Image (cartoon, grey):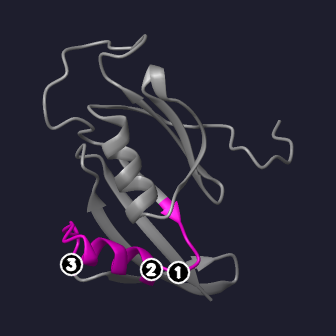
Amino acid sequence: MNSPSVDPDLVPELLVSNTQASIAFWCGLCGFQIKYQRPKEGFACITRGRAHLMLEQRGVGRNWITAPLEPPLGRGVNFQISVDCLDPILTSLGDADHPLFMVPVEMRWARASERLISIARAAMWSRSLVAQTFVQATG
């Protein structure tokens, strides 16, 4: 049973090659903020609204590695992150010359209960090659 909480019930933890570079991408370009971190362990928990991620640096501290890590890491994973407005993220990524995976931004319609909503989606790769899609829904 889910109880109301500001923290999600599921928080993905990403094994990254460089925590500071990942923080620069996620926080600097995508609008996340550091909730807490343990720099000596190469660890940070970051948030944007109700979206939470944990970043853990490979080779620092205890890593949960279950198979050989071969690039590109994160194959088959896509994180969808809901945002109020895509424009600031797209501007930050453009200013940093960070390419989008899906160009142009995709516009779709979906049925939500009894009404149609418009969904704008922008997909990109993070520096560690994990796919993420930022979604802005409007009614």
Q: Position of residue 127 (x, y in %)?
A: 24, 49
Q: Which residues are magenta?
A: 81-103
Please determine whether, in this image, residue 69 is positioned above or below residue 13.
above
Q: Marks 2 and 3, Cα distance to the nearest angstrom?
A: 16 Å
Please determine whether, in this image, residue 13 is positioned above or below residue 131.
above
Residue 98 belongs to the span the image colors magenta: yes
Q: Quadrant of the C terminus?
A: bottom right
Identify the residue shown where x is 35% and y is 81%: 91
Residue 102 belongs to the span the image colors magenta: yes
Residue 94 horizontal side relative to residue 25, left or right: left
Asked whether disc 1 touches disc 2, contact meaning CB atoms under 8 Å apart, the reply is yes
Residue 16 horizontal side relative to residue 12, left or right: left
Q: Marks 1 and 2, Cα distance to the nearest angstrom?
A: 7 Å
Q: Position of residue 97 (x, y in %)?
A: 19, 71
Asked whether disc 3 touches disc 1, contact meaning CB atoms under 8 Å apart, the reply is no
Q: Residue furthest front?
A: 40
The residue carrying pointer 2 sits among few (fewer than 14), some (14 to 19) or many (20 or more) residues within 10 Å by Cα, namely few
Question: Is disc 1 placed on a helix, strand or loop?
Answer: loop
Q: Amino acid at mark 2?
A: Pro
Residue 103 sits in quarter: bottom left
Q: Which mark is residue 85?
A: 1
Residue that mark 3 sits on: 103
Residue that mark 2 sits on: 88
Please determine whether, in this image, residue 62 is positioned above or below residue 125.
above
- The mark lying in front, picked from 2 and 3, is 2
Q: Amino acid at mark 3?
A: Val
Identify the residue shown where x is 46% and y is 21%: 40
Residue 82 sits in quarter: bottom right
